[in-house]
Image (tube, helix red, strand yellow):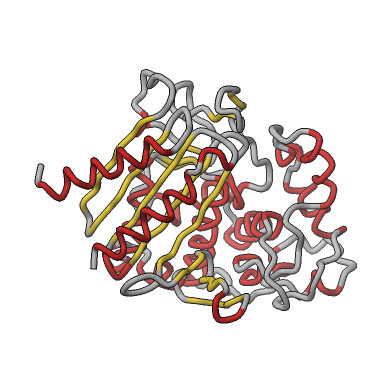
Amino acid sequence: MNRERAALEDRLAREVARIDAPDVVLGVTRRGKRTVVTGGRVAESTTPREALRYELGSVSKTYAVLLLATLAAEGVLGQDDRLAAHLPSSLRLPHRASRGITLRHLATHTSGLPRIPYRLLPGALLRPYESGYARYDTERLLDAFAATRPRYPAGRRWIYSNFGVSLLGPALARAAGVAYPALLGTRVLRPLGLTGTTLRPGPEGADAVGYRADGHSPVPATDMGAFTAAGAVRATPDDLLGFLEAHLNPAGTPLSGPLKEVQVPQLQRGGRRGETHTLTWFQHPAPGGPLLFHAGATFGQQAFCGYHPASGTGLAAVATRHGRACRLVPLAYELLYALAGEGR
């Protein structure tokens, strides 16, 4: 092991110790070479932490939008197609603003739809560790869409929306004539060699167990129901690094065009010091070039994925604890930013 690799392992180990969770995995890829360090407050199970699959929460959106870009490249649909064109013709949309929403609006959180359907709010407040998404099948999701008046006309304002991205699931499935899980598998996961990534819980011992904000009370595996596109992906740390490497080196993959497409800036909000967004990634300025990232959380786990093309650096981080006390996301972001500056 060379001195640089040993120094990186020591650095990751220090960061792992700062993240307060039962299980933590930090993985870095630098110009194709991977370094993974694990730790946590509980004893490791029979399956090593780095071999478990972790719930990615909203990081799942980056997979859904890459699928959108892939289907657009194949000519199956267009990113600026109206959403309604890829939903059942029997679905009546009484609100004019709903009829103007495109697939691109869903991907970029500019559809005007709220974060979650209004009917989900009471349950989310009363039962914060129970997935209200599980009670929504596709029919109920589409009914909620039809009943919801968008807060703004499509394209007018940026509003982060699980609701909006979830609608990509049935829309892409209908356009391709294939159920969403199988569609993601054949068009994205298999071409990129992501064999440790799935949308459903696996057999006992395959998936990490999440915990509440107290870090001690376990929670059941998250069931996203019809909100699959917005938050159902589970992946091993190795697969997360593979996903990031595909974005860092699109030309070396079968999805070169779509991987480049999802990195192109689409909009900026908040003025000169605000956020820049690509089709699916948040983008911040960093030494040598932009840093792209996305974070996610479920009811008992957190995840962060980010990469810096200019230095060939990617970082994946997962932890099995809900809530801010875990500190996974801010620490992972700070580490990636620092590595980006050092790796030019």
Q: Position of residue 288 (x, y in %)?
A: 31, 74
Q: Residue at x 69, y 33 (%)?
A: 129
Is residue 15 found left or right of 96 in the rendered image?
Answer: left
Image quadrant where residue 120 sits: top right
Q: Position of residue 66 (x, y in %)?
A: 48, 62
Quadrant, the C terminus: bottom left
Is residue 58 found left or right of 254 in the rendered image?
Answer: right
Between 154 and 125, the residue placed more toward the observer is: 125
Is residue 218 found left or right of 18 in the rendered image?
Answer: right
Above or below: residue 128 compared with residue 60: above
Q: Position of residue 37 (x, y in %)?
A: 30, 37
Return the residue found at the far bottom: 272
Q: Position of residue 230 (x, y in %)?
A: 61, 52
Number of numbered callouts drawn: 0
Q: Residue at x 55, y 49 (%)?
A: 296
Is residue 47 found left or right of 184 in the rendered image?
Answer: left
Between 136 and 17, the residue placed more toward the observer is: 17
Q: Residue at x 60, y 22 (%)?
A: 217
Image quadrant where residue 102 sits: bottom right
Above or below: residue 67 compared with residue 301: below
Return the residue found at the far left: 2
Q: Residue at x 50, y 43 (%)?
A: 327
Quadrant, the N terminus: top left
